[in-house]
Image (cartoon, rainbow, N blue to C red):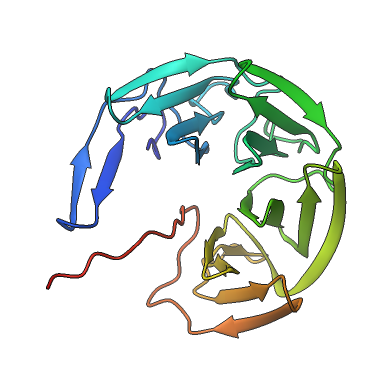
Amino acid sequence: AGGRINSRDVWMYNSQLNVWVRVASLAKGRWRHKMAVLHGKVYAVGGYDGQTRLSSVECYDSFANRWTDVAPLKEAVSSPAVASCSNRLYVIGGGPDDNTCSDKVQCYDPVTNTWLLRSSIPIAKRCISAVCLNNLIYVSGGLTNNIFCYDPLEDYWMNVATTFSKQESCGMTVCNGKIFILGGKSESGEAMDTVLCYDPGSGILTGVAAMPRPICYHGCVSIHRYHKH
C-alpha cells in the first residue's frame, strides 16, 4: 500500500491466479509506513504524508473490502518496525521528525482499541524491520549490525546476534522456522542484494544466495506457493 507521497492505493496479490488486484484505498495517503496482519486483518501504521508524520492507523477487513480508522499511535512515526505478536500489534522505534529517532515501543490491543507503551528498544532507530517467531519479536536494520529480540510476556529486550554488515530499510520474514533478512541500504547508501538467514534455535547467522538485484525500502512476506496440478 502507499509507497509514494499521498498515495492511497492498495494492491493484493493472489498467488493462485498469480495476479495483483487493486482493493479499497486507504482513507489517508501515506508512505514510509509499515503494515502487519493481526487476527486476519491488515493494519497500515503511521508513515509520512509529505508534510507531517502520521499517528493514523487503519485496519483493513478483506471480507468487507473496507479500511476503518482505529485508535491513533501515542507517538506519530515514520519508518518504524511493526509486528503482530501474542495478540497485540507492536510499533517499534521510527522517526517522529526528520532529525530524531524514537526508542518507544507502542503496543496496540485490538480488543480494547487502545495503545500502551512498553519497555523501550535499547537503541533509538528508524528504518528498522521486525518479525514475530515463537512469541518473540526480532528487530534488525537501522544501520546497526545487531539483531534485537523482545519478549512481550516479560517486557524485556536482549541482543541476540550480530550481522556481517550494517543495513537499514531491509526486508524481514519468517520461513520454515528461520528468519530471513533481505536487501536493504548500506552505510554508503547503496541498495543491497544480500540475504541473511538467522536460526534462533542455534543462534547461527548465515549468508544465503543473493537476490537477482539489489533492493531497499521494500516489504517481505512468506506465503504458501500455489502449484498448478
155 on left or right of 92? right
17 on left or right of 33? left
Residue at 79% in and 34% down: 104
Residue at 69% in and 44% down: 126
The x, y position of residue 111, in whole percent, is 60, 20
Q: How many marks?
A: 0
* In the foreground, 167 or 15: 15
217 on left or right of 227? right
The quadrant where residue 114 appears: top right
Quadrant occupied by the N terminus: top left
The x, y position of residue 17, in whole percent, is 14, 56
- Residue 141 appears in the figure: no
Quadrant occupied by the C terminus: bottom left
The x, y position of residue 11, in whole percent, is 28, 40
Residue at 43% in and 32% down: 41
The quadrant where residue 118 appears: top right
The quadrant where residue 117 appears: top right
The x, y position of residue 60, in whole percent, is 39, 27
> In the displayed image of the protein, which residue is found farthest to the left?
229
* In the foreground, 45 or 178: 178
The image shows residue 55, relative to residue 179, as above or below, that is above
The image shows residue 204, relative to residue 61, as above or below, that is below
- Residue 113 appears in the figure: yes
The image shows residue 47, relative to residue 156, as above or below, that is above
